[in-house]
Image (cartoon, grey):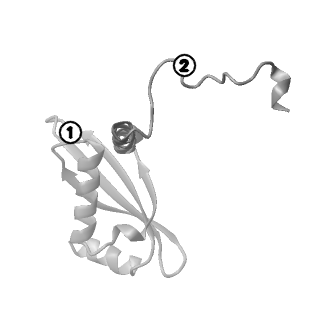
């Protein structure tokens, strides 16, 4: 714990990056590792191990919530994150895809989008030269 306090003091409310990796251990339990990358007061780039924790779910939302919680426990603000690196980025991108799908479903419900056959076809052009 003293090591983490020393790292937090070294960051000194400045920007930092996080490197996150999740994998299963020998007993098939999912673990998530967080490494902090920052520039110290002398201008040297530092990369320090922060924590390894057990996670029950490796969905993007679950990992995000765990990351935010761990940062809060150590008085680090997510708004200070200046860079992010994830091994298994497809898991984290899942959250973006889910969000986009929800937006499309909402637009369809509101009638802002239409689906059907041939909706993207241009019928007003008689020949290719008509666009000039």
Q: Where does the image place residue 20, in percent across and percent down from the top left?
A: 35, 51
The part of the image, by quadrant, that contains residue 88 is top left
The part of the image, by quadrant, that contains residue 50 is bottom left
Which image quarter is the N terminus in?
bottom left
Comes first in the chain, label 2 or label 1: 1
Q: Nearer the viewer, residue 67 or 1?
A: 67
Mark 2 to mark 1: distance in Å? 51 Å
Can you identify the residue that label 2 sits on? 118
Circle 1 sits in a helix, a strand or a loop, which is it? loop
- The structure residue drawn at horizontal position 53% and vertical position 73%, both measured from the top left corner, is 44
Q: Is residue 69 above or below residue 10?
A: above
Q: Where does the image place residue 66, in percent across and percent down from the top left?
A: 23, 56
Local packing at callout 1 (Cα closer than 10 Å; few below 14, some 14-19, many 20+) is few
Q: Nearer the viewer, residue 98 or 42?
A: 98
Local packing at callout 2 (Cα closer than 10 Å; few below 14, some 14-19, many 20+) is few
- The structure residue drawn at horizontal position 27% and vertical position 62%, both measured from the top left corner, is 68
Q: Nearer the viewer, residue 67 or 7?
A: 67
Q: Where does the image place residue 57, in percent across and percent down from the top left?
A: 19, 42
Can you identify the residue that label 1 sits on? 25
Circle 2 sits in a helix, a strand or a loop, which is it? loop
Kindly report which numbered mark, 2 or 1, lies closer to the viewer in this rendering. Answer: 2
Side of 67 where 42 appears, left or right: right
Q: Nearer the viewer, residue 128 or 35?
A: 128
């Amino acid at each position: 714990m003293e090591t983490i306090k020393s790292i937090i003091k070294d960051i000194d409310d400045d920007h930092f990056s996080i490197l996150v990796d999740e994998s299963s251990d020998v007993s098939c339990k999912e673990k998530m590792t967080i490494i902090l990358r920052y520039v110290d007061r002398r201008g040297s780039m530092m990369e320090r191990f922060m924590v390894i924790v057990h996670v029950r779910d490796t969905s993007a939302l679950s990992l995000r919530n765990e990351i935010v919680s761990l940062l809060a426990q150590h008085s680090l603000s997510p708004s200070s994150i200046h860079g992010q690196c994830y091994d298994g980025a497809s898991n984290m991108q899942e959250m973006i895809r889910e969000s986009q799908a929800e937006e499309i479903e909402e637009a369809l419900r509101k009638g802002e989008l239409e689906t059907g056959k041939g909706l993207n076809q241009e019928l007003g052009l008689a020949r290719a030269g008509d666009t000039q």
